[in-house]
Image (cartoon, rainbow, N blue to C red):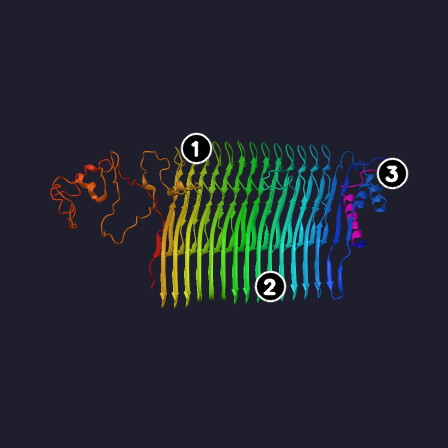
Amino acid sequence: MQTWAKRGIQTAIVTGGLLMLGTGIASADENVSPDRAPSAIDSNRVTGNVIVPIDLKENVVATPLGTITTPEVHRSISTEGVTGALSGKTGAANPLVRGAQDKVSAVSTGSSLTGNRVDADVVVPIRACGNAVAVLRNASVEADCSYDDIVSGDAIETDGEGQSLSGNVVSIANATPTQITGNAVSVLATADAKTTASQSASAGSDITTSGKDSSLSGNIAAVQSAVPVQLTNNAATVGGRANSESTAENTALAPGSLTTTGEGSALGGNVLGAPLAPIAAVNGNAAAVAGKADTVAENTSTAEAGSTHTGGVNDIDTWLETSGKDGSLAGNVIQPQLAGPVSVDDNAVAGAGNGSATSSTTNFAKVGGFTSTTAEGGSLAGNLVDAPAALPVSGGGNAVGGLGNVRADHTNDVTAVAGSGTYTNGDRSVLGANSANAPVGGAVDLCGTGVAGGGNSSAVCENDVITEVGGYNGTTGNDSVGSGNIGQLPVAIPGEGFANSIGVAGNASGTAVEDKGVRVGGDTNTRDDNGTISSNVVSVPTGLGAQAFGLAGGAFSNPTATGDSNTTLTAGGEATATGKHGSVAGNIVQVPTSNPAQIFGDTVLLGGNGSSTVANSLDATSGGDSTSTGEGGSLAGNVITAPQTSSPQVYGHAINGLGNTESTVDNTLTNFSGGKVTTTGKEGSLSGNGVSAAPAIPSQVQGDAVTVGGNGKSTTTNDSTLVSGGDSTTDGTDAAVSGILANVPVNGQPSAHGNAVTALGKAATVADSTALTSAGGKATTTGDHALSGSVIEAPIESAVRAYDIPAEIAGQALTTVTDDNTQLTGEEASATNARGIELPGGVDHLLPATGVPALGGLTKLPKLPVAQDRSFKGQLPLVGDGLNLTQGGLPGLGTIGGLGGLTSLVPAGRSLPTAGFAQPRTGALPAVPGLAGILPSGASLTNLDLNPLQGLPALPTQSARSFSTPTAGITRIVGTLF
């Protein structure tokens, strides 16, 4: 980048400036000639700068011709002179610019076309330092590659109040610090690099303007981007040795809040804000071909765009603020936002060689903040379109080797935050303050995977990821028409593979510990009284995912996989709306779905020995409660919900042919979708009705062993809870066609687990599964009219389950299965829809200290152990003092030692029996030799006076219980096929 590059950049900016001049948006801020009258548009300005600092130092290149340290280069390409000319600061020496100014100045615009600003602050520092390149000769370098911070951009303040086509701002702020440090590359030689590197770049600042009482004024279009680029601390060799021991830190900032207003204006105060913070990094990797490559690296990248403060996930910053109050087509906002690193870090790859990467990576990316606008009293104003996305992508800590030895040990810490909450006020407006939101978040990772072909590969990864996207969405629509409505589509999508191992004629191991949290969207809340087609909510929270981890597989190899996964997924939240005294207002449609798919802890092998050991915890939530009111309204406060949950999981299988496999898995799953529905249609018409379809269908295939000519063992523990929907409550008192509830809870449990199948081998499974599935809840309403306050229910419950099945052909199949399965459908599920409640529905929750619980709601109690051999051998033990119970308990038995304490129960002259018990008659007490005369003659179990036991508390009673009649049956397959 020499003179030609500099001139090219200058020419581009000159051309762009002329085009903007032609549209009347920008010109000089002062006249060239002091004798010329001031131009009406001389307050329009083109400002900003493009800065490209280039620093090259302490790079070493070795060849057979010798070893050199490349010359240092410290240059900076800047376009300050060009933007100054466009602003008139240099006297507009360029005749093209001067001619354009002359033409524009001849136009009389009165009080229009003033205070417009075009600003471009671009900072792109390029730093290459501390790299070593060795070709047939050794090279080494040790360097400090730290640079001073570069900051460009001042706050932009302008004003278009009371004017036309004034106070508009177009701004581009970009910081792209590029870092190339600490790399070692060799060919048939040795290269060593030891460096410490750091740099920071910042571009842009706050933007403030106004379009109050104007026309086409006070609008903002701003792109704020922070893109740190790293190519650091890598080692690569062909037939030699490469080593890097380095650290690198890179920070990019494009800060600034956006503030304007379009109050009382037409087409004023609108904002397009686009903050971007994608990190790009290739760090700490080791690659060798017929050689040896090693890295020990520590890399950190930070990117923030649009946010006003630094360094906090939970910071609530007002990033964007405008207004369309009493305006027309004013105060509207569109804000696409993107955060998330794309990084390839700390991998080791070798072909017929050796490689190791021991490194850590920390990435932090944050964009945007809280957004506020209003349409109060306006028309087509204060509307908001929000599309934040955070999708960090990383591939790190993987080891891939062929005919060599490779090892990767990686720590990854990633935080990506995009956007925040939004609020807009649509009171007394027409088609105003509507909010459309489409937040998307997740994480794509490939971490801790070992792949071996004829060698040894070991991969270790610790992966911590936090993704936060969007937040609360609030509006109002009181006394409005077509205002305050909310549409929300939050999507949580993690997709990843970690702790996997694949081997072909080699040994591979993959180990990973992962903590991942993904939250997308939040609660929605809209308020409306006396509105028309206002304050309605449509929310479709979607939880998806594809996770594959702890898998071991291959052919004639020895793969091992060890994984510990903890994942939390949250999409959307509660939906609240009001339509009191409104028309087509306060209605809610909520369709939350949660279907995160997982495959983990499986071992599949042809020849060899393989094992997988996994602990998995998945906590997923989609949507939440729906609350509204249609009191005194027409077509108001109606709620339609369709929550759906499933658990597509395949895990804990041991499958082999001519090999030995073992899988051990501990799985915990909780998955909640939707929640309670609360509304009312009191004194309304076609209001306060609720329609709910709540399917909860787990689909787990787990803990099976399948072998052909080999040995396989599967040991699994499963604890899963799925809840879809909840209770529904409304009121149709003094109303017409209101307060009606229609519920269709669907509860199915297709699953297969704990089966063993073998031919010419041995297959064994040990499975302990506890599963609770809850669909729907209790429906409650009130009404005093034939078409109000009624409940329509159609519960559907079925299960097709195959478990505890041994199947063998000339082999041995063993199954040990414990299965505890509970299905709660409709009213049965009423007590399970609150998170944290683990007791089955119906268990009394307020138990007095002296009371005994009514156990009618218990669907299953564990069985008491039953001894197989009930006979006593030898003497009873001497246990010292006996049982001395208080009044009302068992009789005092004195001292049990030697049974002497029992004498009080035996009348004088009688003795304890010395012979065995005779077989009793039906309904009678057994005849006991030696006790003749003690019991009344002919005493039976029905008339025996057990006076000493009168003080015992009463046994719990089984309360009456009703069940909804399912429309489908239950099918279970248990037992032996062969």
Q: Earlier in the sequence, mark 2 or mark 1?
A: 2
Please name which of the two marks, 1 or 3, marks the residue nearer to the observer.
Answer: 3
Percent across and percent down for residue 493 are 54, 50
Name the residue type under label 3: Ser
Could you tell me how far apart the alpha carbons at marks 1 and 3 are, in whole angstroms?
78 Å
Mark 2 neighbour density, 10 Å: few (under 14) some (14–19) many (20 or more): many
Q: Is residue 117 above or below residue 187?
A: above
Name the residue type under label 1: Ala
Secondary element at image label 3: loop
Q: Quadrant of residue 97?
A: top right
Q: Which residue bears the numbered disc 3?
A: 33
Q: Is residue 599 above or below residue 222?
A: below
Percent across and percent down for residue 100 are 82, 44
Please name which of the two marks, 2 or 1, marks the residue nearer to the observer.
Answer: 2
Name the residue type under label 2: Asn
Q: Earlier in the sequence, mark 1 or mark 3?
A: 3
Residue stretch in magenta: 5-34
Q: Which residue bears the numbered disc 1?
A: 735
Which of these two is toward me, 23 or 192? 192
Residue 804 shows up from this direction: no
Secondary element at image label 2: strand
Which of these two is toward me, 834 or 293? 293
Please name which of the two marks, 2 or 3, marks the residue nearer to the observer.
Answer: 2
Q: In the displayed structure, does residue 401 sit left or right of residue 710?
A: right
